[in-house]
Amino acid sequence: MSSVQHFAGPRLYVFSGAGLSAESGIPTFRTGDGIWSQESIDEVCNFLTWRRNREAVFRFYNQRISEKRDARPNDAHRILAAWQSMWGTERVRLITQNIDDLLEQAGAQHVIHLHGDMHSMLCTLCDLRFPKSGEEYRLDTACPQCGAAETVKPGVVFFHEAAPEYVNLHRMQHEMTGDDVFIAIGTAFQVVSPESMLPQERWRQYERNFLIDPEPRRAEFFGCVEPESATVGLRNLEIRVHALMTML
């Protein structure tokens, strides 16, 4: 017997990158003059070296918090949250590479953050993830479980660090059917590729694979490409998505 659960109607999988939050004023990491063109990944986002660069790491992520402080959800966040509210968390799976909480602020009830978030800390000694206290990351924060401080880092997943939530991508590959809808928004596919998310039978211009990005990449996987911002692209697709999600 198959272990895949079946729900009433197709599922909607939405995979988002930095382009989803760009309209809210949060800088992207890779596109154009993104953050990684100005900062050293090895210094501030490398799990193998972060402890010797601890002050720079904390300073870098406190800058990201400062950039986000005045950011508010945009209409793309609100559309996705409304879809999840309408069809439920079992049918609408929101998977993001973003470390902000704008989807949650827009009303999303369940979001999978593949690369962690800016609201937690992780003790790399005992593997405890816990909420950060206050607005910024503090260098003297001690792990509430083991008491260590030097092993505590921001709750963002660094390069070369295990990312536990990636199990959701593998699950998605196995459970996605031909009737399900897949939308990728604002991602360069440099960290996560379509091959790692989609079942092999959808490794082509599948009619229910949608891509929204002003500078589309890997378009060969998508039956519909919207070379637009996240909000414009989602508005353009709303009627089609509703039709597909309400098919009996």
Image (spheres, rainbow, N blue to C red):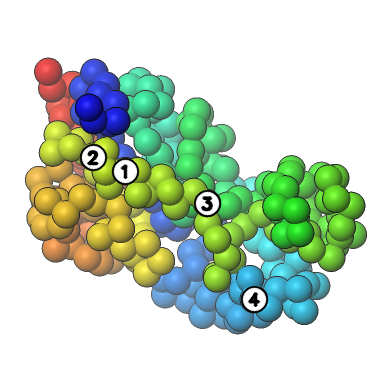
Q: Label 3 is placed on what type of residue?
A: Pro
Q: Are marks 4 and 2 in contact (CB under 8 Å)?
A: no
What residue did someone put label 1 on?
A: 172
Q: Considering only vertical position in the picture, is 92 above or below 161? A: above
Residue at x 37% of width, y 26% of height: 90
Q: How crowded is mark 4: few (under 14 residues within 10 Å), some or many (20 or more)?
A: few
The structure residue drawn at horizontal position 11% and vertical position 57%, both measured from the top left corner, is 204
Assess disc 3: are there few (<14), some (14-19) or many (≥20) residues with their C-alpha within 10 Å of its C-alpha.
few
Element type at marker 3? helix
Q: Can residue 235 be seen in this view?
A: no
Q: Which residue is drawn at 41% across and 56% down?
A: 17
190 versus 119 height, above or below: below
* Residue position for label 3: 164
Q: Earlier in the sequence, mark 3 or mark 4?
A: 4
The total of numbered circles placed on residues is 4
Q: Are marks 3 and 1 in contact (CB under 8 Å)?
A: no
Rendered location of residue 140, percent (x, y): 90, 59
Which image quarter is the C terminus in? top left
Q: Earlier in the sequence, mark 1 or mark 4?
A: 4
> In the rendered structure, which disc, 2 or 3, sits on the residue that comes first in sequence?
3
Which is more toward the observer, 65 or 123?
123
Viewer-nearest residue: 114 or 237: 114
Question: Is 49 positioned to the left or the right of 244 in the image?
Answer: right
Say which residue label 4 marks. 48
